[in-house]
Amino acid sequence: MTPTPETSTSGAREPDASRRSDRARRAILSATRELISDVGYARLSIEGIASAAGVGKQTIYRWWRSKAAVVFDAILEANSQDGGSVALPDTGDLESDLRAVLRGTVAALTEPATDRLQRAITAEIQTDLVVADELVHRLLRPQLDATAARITAAVQAGQAGESVNPQLAAELLFGPVFHRWLLRTGPLDDEFADGVLAMVLAGLWPR
Amino acid sequence: MTPTPETSTSGAREPDASRRSDRARRAILSATRELISDVGYARLSIEGIASAAGVGKQTIYRWWRSKAAVVFDAILEANSQDGGSVALPDTGDLESDLRAVLRGTVAALTEPATDRLQRAITAEIQTDLVVADELVHRLLRPQLDATAARITAAVQAGQAGESVNPQLAAELLFGPVFHRWLLRTGPLDDEFADGVLAMVLAGLWPR
Amino acid sequence: MTPTPETSTSGAREPDASRRSDRARRAILSATRELISDVGYARLSIEGIASAAGVGKQTIYRWWRSKAAVVFDAILEANSQDGGSVALPDTGDLESDLRAVLRGTVAALTEPATDRLQRAITAEIQTDLVVADELVHRLLRPQLDATAARITAAVQAGQAGESVNPQLAAELLFGPVFHRWLLRTGPLDDEFADGVLAMVLAGLWPR
Amino acid sequence: MTPTPETSTSGAREPDASRRSDRARRAILSATRELISDVGYARLSIEGIASAAGVGKQTIYRWWRSKAAVVFDAILEANSQDGGSVALPDTGDLESDLRAVLRGTVAALTEPATDRLQRAITAEIQTDLVVADELVHRLLRPQLDATAARITAAVQAGQAGESVNPQLAAELLFGPVFHRWLLRTGPLDDEFADGVLAMVLAGLWPR
DNA sequence: CGTTAAACGAGACGGTACGTCAAGTCTTTTC
DNA sequence: GAAAAGACTTGACGTACCGTCTCGTTTAACG
């Protein structure tokens, strides 16, 4: 999100990142998180962030392209505080490993603060393709890839059919959870996660 | 969406639906569809709709609670023009029936106009729970239910395991497609749809 | 204000006065008086009058050209309830007769309800020349003429110089009172009225 | 009209006058004058002023409380361009000095542009007491005081009776002129002004 | 005295303007 | 030279009324 000189292709002058005030950066991101929890994303405004962070509006516009970009960085920072690693454990038991990730995802999405942030960013990337791309590459793909990697390991261990497409399987796991969460078509709980997992695992041994 | 007097429980005065101008209603919905295609949802404004439809703003506010509600009705009307039925065909061949729906969904989401409308409404229901509810009950649930019904029929015909949860299976079909479409994690095409279908069908016969 | 068929020169259909609902007319005028006292003229609306009077908007528009016209009729009706006569008494003592009128005017303008109505109509006739004309001929001129007539009588009785212009004298009496009232340049009380009167009377005997 | 920080007693944030754009201020006031002449006060709108002045509405609302306040400042500025001084000349001849002011007033009120502006502000101060006060203290009182001062000088020069109330006399001069102008009860011309003056002068020597 | 046309209440309609909020840009002052 | 402060233009918000236009429903003159 933070523009780095080497990737800049526009003619516009880039701010000098070395002079950037870390105090301001942190104040902005944490004010953003706080405000999103308080008033929700729809009523979140750049002006509100600036005044809550004790920062000039220009300072925000100088370093981020859009409200979505700020929110995205706010999320990223929150995630990386939790560790930030995406690698799945490999206990040797595929089912329990996958159950852990899936239940973890359900837990995260169920937690109000995360719920709000994720919904906010999900809504926003419908409009802002730059942030959308960032999100996919920095958060979604790594997660899917990690899951696919675990499944690949299982295939190699002979715990799944060789014709299985691990990437596809990963999407079959997360897709339904995401669908139910975002569209609220039903209760999102461990039972549902386990149901999805069971059915996907059944599909890993093709007839 | 359209308020019906008999269901009104609030103290607020409801407009008299019997006096409603159909000319205005149609102009608003079709202007909405047009504008969303032209400028996208983010830059869609009530004011814009009103002026494009040759209608007073109040006429929109009189009949819809929010921009999202207008867009939702615009979608509904567009859908119902296409037939509006959600029942799946039952040719006896579960796989080809499901393939038809899934490929149809992919085709619809791939078509630019539908894509925009659906993204718009998806983003908006993150904020507007009333419309969210409406959407679930009027569009999503029926579609999932129809698919589940087809699967139930297959179970009864002995084409799938008896322990299968048809609702869950339906979500396993649509979830990944929706996930890939909304988050753009990969190409959305028939090949993907077929891959999802194959894996889900494999899961319909539990080990 | 009320259109009479014989003066109608326009091609537009005139409403049939003989069918006019007196109930509605009275409700409108009294609602108007009430509302003007409550919310003032600026926030008085035709819609407000209609709903307070339990009357359709069209019924107002059918019989009056403008908000000002309604207010004017409301004032007229209020005035005529008080007697409506404008003739001054002639006790033979010019000074005390004039003092009575002038103090009466001060008293009326000081009374809150009258104050509001008069200010309202005064403000409105700056814009609405038709009502302005009506006001002058139905209220102001009669009052000035009556006063001038009393002064003329005094001249004939040898109580004032023959070269005196009675009309002008009348305006010298009311002008300053009106000026002070409307512009609030100072306290409006009997002392002021008496001061004006004294100076004007002094002028009635030219040097 | 222009808020000065040191007089601010309200809790509301005052804009920082030192940052005020003079360009915008002038554009607003001159657009206001132009529009009032063109379309009259009744059809003058803040929105119209803003667009004619090439200014955001907010910039008007930031510096003025109401349409009347803008109009008032527009008048003030126009007046001060003409010199702005209110002191009367003292040629030693009271009658000719007063005739000059009174005829000047008549001339101003007869001039269409001034007529409109004055009627506008007169109508508006019936509603807006803050502007009313401002008008009285900044325009009306100074004018009356200046006239009264000239009369006081005449008294001291032995040209008028000692018991004369100069303030009252000033109101006797302007009151009738204002009355006739505002209510249009008769022609407003030099003849009328001279008549008023003659009668008032006659009253300056009490019987 | 029943018919019937008009006035009536209600209120939806296309509009204009309101006063507010926030967006993103620009300028000035401070650190 | 970045940052704070905040005024600027722009544009949309949701609301209030305008004056016009149907709707059914009284109601009162006349045939």
Image (cartoon, coloured by chain):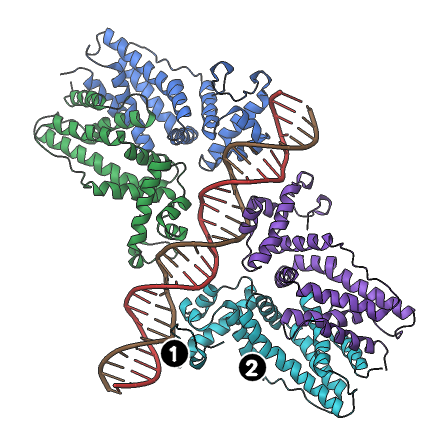
Chain colours: A blue, B green, C cyan, D purple, E brown, F red
- As drawn, the residue found furthest toward the top would be A157
Q: Please name the residue that numbered disc 2 is placed on.
A: C80
Expressed as whole percent of the image width and height from the top left, the position of residue D192 reads 72, 74
Task: Identify the secondary structure beneath mark 1.
Answer: loop
Answer above or below: position of B181 versus B72: above
Disc 1: which chain? C
What residue is drawn where x is 73% and y is 57%? D138
Query: As shown in the figure, which amino acid type bears the numbered disc 1?
Result: Asp
Q: Which residue is nearer to you in this view: A179 or D186?
A: D186
What residue is drawn where x is 23% and y is 9%? A155
Answer above or below: position of B156 versus D71: above
Lateral position of residue A107 relative to residue C88, left or right: left
Q: Is residue B29 visible?
A: yes
Tell me the quarter of the image containing the C terminus of chain D: bottom right
Expressed as whole percent of the image width and height from the top left, the position of residue A177 reads 30, 27
Quarter of image, res A20: top right
**For the residues marked 1 and 2, what is the alpha-carbon distance in whole angstroms?**
25 Å
Whichever of labels 1 and 2 marks the residue nearer the N terminus, that label is 1
What residue is drawn where x is 56% and y is 44%? D54
Answer above or below: position of A132 versus A149: below
Q: Please name the residue that numbered disc 1 is placed on.
A: C16
Identify the mark at residue B43; answer none if there is no mark.
Answer: none
Judged by depth in the image, the label closer to the viewer, 1 or 2, is 1
Q: Which residue is nearer to you in this view: D56 or C116?
A: D56
Query: As shown in the figure, which amino acid type bears the numbered disc 2?
Result: Ser
Quarter of image, res C62: bottom left
Expressed as whole percent of the image width and height from the top left, the position of residue D9 reads 69, 48
